[in-house]
């Protein structure tokens, strides 16, 4: 499995997305699209990105009963996304059903990764709202192990957790890590950050980078710098 830089296309429309991507010329990065863009544009945005030669991480974070997730994953598999995801909190049964739904008749399937605990959930919310009393980092590792045991390929996590996830789940279990910033650039609203070079050192498999590239004066130079620092 190759290391790669995934550009988070957090735009509201296909028009904005393609006007950004056009700034990269012939370079066709791996892109992540999320709920806002997908709900605005539907599957056509994925088809167009694939037609242009991009790999696509569709970040929809599914969480429902196993049968529903299985059927939804079959649709995403037919759309030919490269990575999709779900909430590990949906249980091992839901994750196993998701793997079944994604798997095509020839045995191939997109990569499937789990969100363990959202970074917006802190220990206090975990205890007061979700009634889980264990330390949050133990919950994250347990959810990562559940994902592995259910047959998933990896998790989304902070680069600060990538080493521990690999220690717990094995080095082939993929870590996809947002929260990446150049040393001199703004943190925006990210709190726990790492540079692309440090994310490489701690063993992240894919970094997800949004604003440091999408808001850069020269997005192509920023993307190429990420690739140089992270992939080498
Ligand atoms: O612009 P920025 O580099 O902060 O974008 C990071 C991307 O990764 C955004 O799409 C954000 O929603 C996503 N993400 C994150 N932290 C998580 C999970 C996803 O920043 N824990």
Image (cartoon, helix red, strand yellow):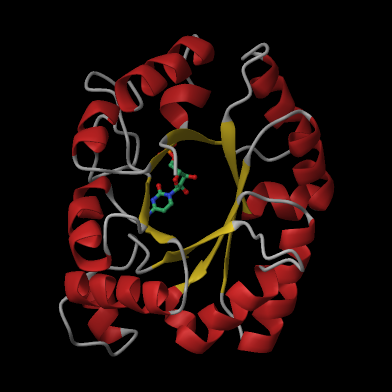
Residue that protrudes farthest toward the front in the picture: 106
Identify the residue at horizontal 70%, vertical 83% (top origin): 68
Q: How many marks?
A: 0
Report x, y in % for residue 158: 28, 51
Identify the residue at horizontal 39%, vertical 60% (top origin): 155
- Would residue 194 be seen by someone viewing this image from the given angle? no
**Which image quarter: residue 111?**
bottom right
Report x, y in % for residue 148: 38, 72
- Would residue 26 be seen by someone viewing this image from the given angle? yes
122 on left or right of 109: left
**Which image quarter: residue 67?**
bottom right
Report x, y in % for residue 82: 62, 49
143 on left or right of 10: left
149 on left or right of 32: left
Identify which residue, 105 or 189, lies in the foreground.
105
134 on left or right of 94: left
**Image quadrant occupied by the N terminus:** top left
**Image quadrant occupied by the C terminus:** top left
Identify which residue, 61 or 5, lies in the foreground.
5
Report x, y in % for residue 141: 24, 71
Name above or below for residue 208 compared with residue 43: above
Name above or below for residue 155 compared with residue 33: below
**Which image quarter: residue 164?**
bottom left
Identify the residue at horizontal 18%, vertical 75% (top origin): 138
Identify the residue at horizontal 19%, vertical 52% (top origin): 163
């Amino acid at each position: 499995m190759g290391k790669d830089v995934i550009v988070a296309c957090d735009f509201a429309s296909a028009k904005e997305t393609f006007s950004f991507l056009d700034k990269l010329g012939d370079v066709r990065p791996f892109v992540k699209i999320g709920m806002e863009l997908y709900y605005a544009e539907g599957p056509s945005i994925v088809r167009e990105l694939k037609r242009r030669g991009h790999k696509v991480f569709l970040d929809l974070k599914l969480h429902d009963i196993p049968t529903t997730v299985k059927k939804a994953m079959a649709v995403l598999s037919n759309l030919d996304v490269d990575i999709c995801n779900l909430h590990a909190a949906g249980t091992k049964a839901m994750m196993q059903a998701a793997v079944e739904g994604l798997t095509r008749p020839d045995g191939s399937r997109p990569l499937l990764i789990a969100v363990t605990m959202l970074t917006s959930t802190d220990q206090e919310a975990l205890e007061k709202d979700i009634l889980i009393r264990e330390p949050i980092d133990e919950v994250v590792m347990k959810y990562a192990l559940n994902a592995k045991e259910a047959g998933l390929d990896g998790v989304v996590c902070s680069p600060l957790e990538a080493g521990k996830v690999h220690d717990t789940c094995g080095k082939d279990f993929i870590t996809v890590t947002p929260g990446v910033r150049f040393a001199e650039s703004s943190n925006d609203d990210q709190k726990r950050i790492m540079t692309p070079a440090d994310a490489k050192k701690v063993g992240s498999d894919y970094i997800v980078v949004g604003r440091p590239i999408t808001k850069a004066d020269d997005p192509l130079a920023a993307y190429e710098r990420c690739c140089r620092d992270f992939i080498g």
